[in-house]
Amino acid sequence: MAAQTPKRMKAIQLVEFDSPYEVREVDIPTNLDPSDLLIKVAAASYCHSDAMVQSGMFSAPLPLTAGHEGSGTVVAVGAKAAKKFQIGDRVMCGLPQHPCDNCDECSGPESQQQYCTNLEYGFLGLNTNGCFAEFVKCDSRFTAKLPDKVSLLSAAPLACAGRTAWRAVLKTQLKPGEWVCFIGSGGGLGHLGVQFAKALGLRVIGVDATDKGLEVSRKHGADPVVDIRGGNIDVVRKVQTATGGKGAHATICLSDHKDASAIACALTRMHGTMIQIALTEIVAIPMKELIFRDIRVIGSNASGVKETEAMLATVATHGVAVTTVPFEGLHEIGQLCELFHSGSLGGRALIVIDQEQIDLQEKNLE
């Protein structure tokens, strides 16, 4: 099934590593596999992983349409995808493309299929064409319908940042009333993680290194909020004071600073858990934390399908706010990247690609 679409579109493409993006005219994808959807993109946001792709770290094939966080409206549906989706559905795009259905990750719990090591086409925007375009083809098996209360602007960052922060909170396996600490609580993932944790009844400590980050952490419910610029000893003292001298039951490390993982472990109580989701080449943790204090370190990536659906329900029910810094039009990618790399970004930078979709949703919610 397909709505009428043009044959060509504009897209932000990476043509050469360590070089600025180019806005180019390319063909709209028409070769939908049975499980595929064609999405008319409303908004797409920029992530730290996109900067890593741009630097050449993932050895992506070029030219590549950038962006892996996107939302929009379904305009074409593959035969298998039609069992769940129809034209006109508002969706948040899935990242993995075409799992093998045979490996241990695929044949195990559905929530692990995002770890498939034999993806036919890889991941949107990382090694297959992504969401910084007027249209994008994505796999329906990882794509999620949006609840009425979740806006297209909010949904774009949730596609990766939200999925990652949500799964990290779930991986702590904490009970309501227990303490979780976020290192980098005021950032693009952190402000979502804080709200997710509060929605699940956890007590939240926010740790950040900027005035803006500390302000955002307080705004979304972290209490106490600790300025890491006071020094490691001061941070540990304040966290222990807040938690009766024991430290957090679990700490989630969102910062890629070289010392962040070690600090995260130091803020975690004996036998507690540190969840590492910051993308650092080496995770450096002192031996005493692992052995003498029995801190368990777990890595985590983005949520699977069922986890994603639970996340979106939580966003809708609890009014989780996604802080976005929107730019109007694909041609604004240069300004977006400049702000992103300045270190002064106060939210998730995104490009509004189709304002008409945004306006239509707002009208329907009135």
Image: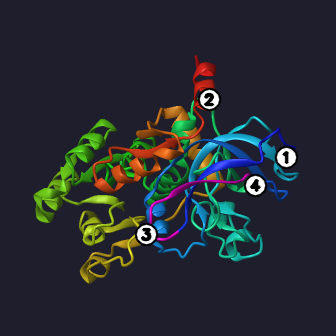
Q: Residue at x 29, y 54 (%)?
A: 342
Q: Nearer the viewer, mark 3 or mark 1?
A: 3
Residue 77 at x, y = what percent?
A: 82, 47
Q: Relative to the observer, which residue lies in front, 259 or 166?
A: 259
Residue 191 at x, y = what percent?
A: 37, 46
Q: Amino acid at mark 1?
A: Lys
Q: Across the whole image, how many numbered discs are drawn on residues?
A: 4
Instruction: Quickly name the residue at label 3.
Output: 18
Does dot 3 land on a helix, a strand or a loop?
A: loop
**Lower position in the chain sequence, tag 3 or tag 4:** 3
Contact (Cβ within 8 Å) of mark 3 with mark 4: no
Instruction: Quickly name the residue at label 4.
Output: 29
Instruction: Quickly name the residue at label 1.
Output: 83
Instruction: Quickly name the residue at label 2.
Output: 356
Q: Residues within 10 Å of mark 4 (few under 14, many from 20)?
A: some
Report how far apart the C-alphas of labels 4 and 1 lie in the structure.
21 Å
Region rendered in magenta: 16-28
Eyeballing the image, is 285 above or below 351? below
Report how far apart the C-alphas of labels 1 and 2 lie in the structure.
27 Å
Contact (Cβ within 8 Å) of mark 4 with mark 1: no
Q: Amino acid at mark 2?
A: Glu
Displayed quadrant of residue 274: bottom left
